Image (spheres, grey):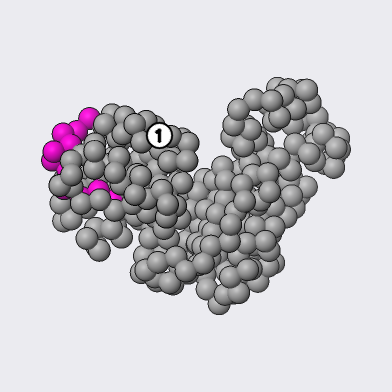
Amino acid sequence: MILIADSGSTKTAWWMGESAATSFAEGRVLTTQGVNPFQMSPDEMQAVFESLPIDGGDVTHIYFYGAGCTTEKVPVVAAALQASFGSTASVFVGSDMLGAAHAVCGCSEGIVGILGTGSNSCLYDGHRLTANVSPLGYILGDEGSGAYIGKRLVGNCLKQQFPADLCRLFLEESQLTPADIIQRTYREPLPNRFLASLTPFCHRHHDRPEVQAFLVDCFSEFFRRNIALYNRSDLLVHFVGSIAWQYEDELRVAADRCGFAVGRIVKDPLEGMVNYTLLNV
């Protein structure tokens, strides 16, 4: 059995197939808790792996692409996988960024962006990542992400940068007071997820020119402060993630204004990751 995983901090999607000849549709997809080696101990990761309702002894190959799977953390994740599924299983561990590149670029050169709760990007040569501009997280960076859009949305509403009716509408629809927002942002856990949870307001009102201009500016910052640093405007920029998928129109406008062309945009990279991996087993 082959296991291919797309893992974030919140959830992990697992594809299971009998062999490399199994198509994505013929396999089975299950979901477990997310895994991040910067936030979890090896025992905690192993507990998540062992929660899969399968016989670990049947697993022959594991391809695990995950958040936090940096060079120094790859051996830690690989050891937890082997402890869970047996030392005879062949294990490959890569970053979620590499998984995204495999999903949208395959074996072609390109620039890849992830726009979800956070953001990230890379330059990909068709086989490996050759450059990465550090996203710096939601406080210092993460331009274009859900957390970034949510942070700026709150600031614009509370500082009356939007028309008064739009600011009032935001507070009514979110059922939050300014005090609630300060509490959730500065005094409670996971403020990045809270801020990202506010972005559907933009989707509900994206027909308003103020919101469209706001979104285009947020995505333009992503291109200016990340993609432009690769100095490869000749390459298509492909995207993975819910924010890129939901705001495709504004993302493409921002790319054009910054001198880039957008290629593929996929909400979920798992199918592309599986197709790439099976072709290269």
Identified at 37% across, 50% down, the residue is 74
Task: Read off the magenta span.
Answer: 53-63
8 or 204: nearer the eye? 8
Q: Residue furthest bottom?
A: 234
Place of residue 116 in the rendered image (x, y in percent of width and height, measured from the top left): 54, 46
Q: Is residue 222 left or right of residue 44?
A: right
184 or 75: nearer the eye? 75
Q: Is residue 58 magenta?
A: yes
Place of residue 102 in the rendered image (x, y in percent of width and height, measured from the top left): 38, 60
* Image quadrant containing the C terminus: bottom left
Counting the numbered discs, the total is: 1
Identified at 85% across, 37% down, the residue is 159
Place of residue 153 in the rendered image (x, y in percent of width and height, measured from the top left): 73, 40
30 or 133: nearer the eye? 133
> Disc 1 residue type?
Ser
Is residue 46 among the parts visible in the rendering? yes
Whether residue 157 is situated above or below residue 218 in the rendered picture: above
* Pointer 1 residue: 41
**Residue 108 figure quarter:** bottom left
Identified at 15% across, 47% down, the residue is 88
136 or 41: nearer the eye? 41
Whether residue 275 is situated above or below residue 108 in the rendered picture: above
Whether residue 154 is situated above or below residue 115 in the rendered picture: above
Is residue 17 among the parts visible in the rendering? no
Q: Residues within 10 Å of mark 1 (few under 14, many from 20)?
A: some
Q: Is residue 20 left or right of residue 145?
A: left
Whether residue 141 is situated above or below residue 37 in the rendered picture: below
Place of residue 1 in the rendered image (x, y in percent of width and height, measured from the top left): 16, 45
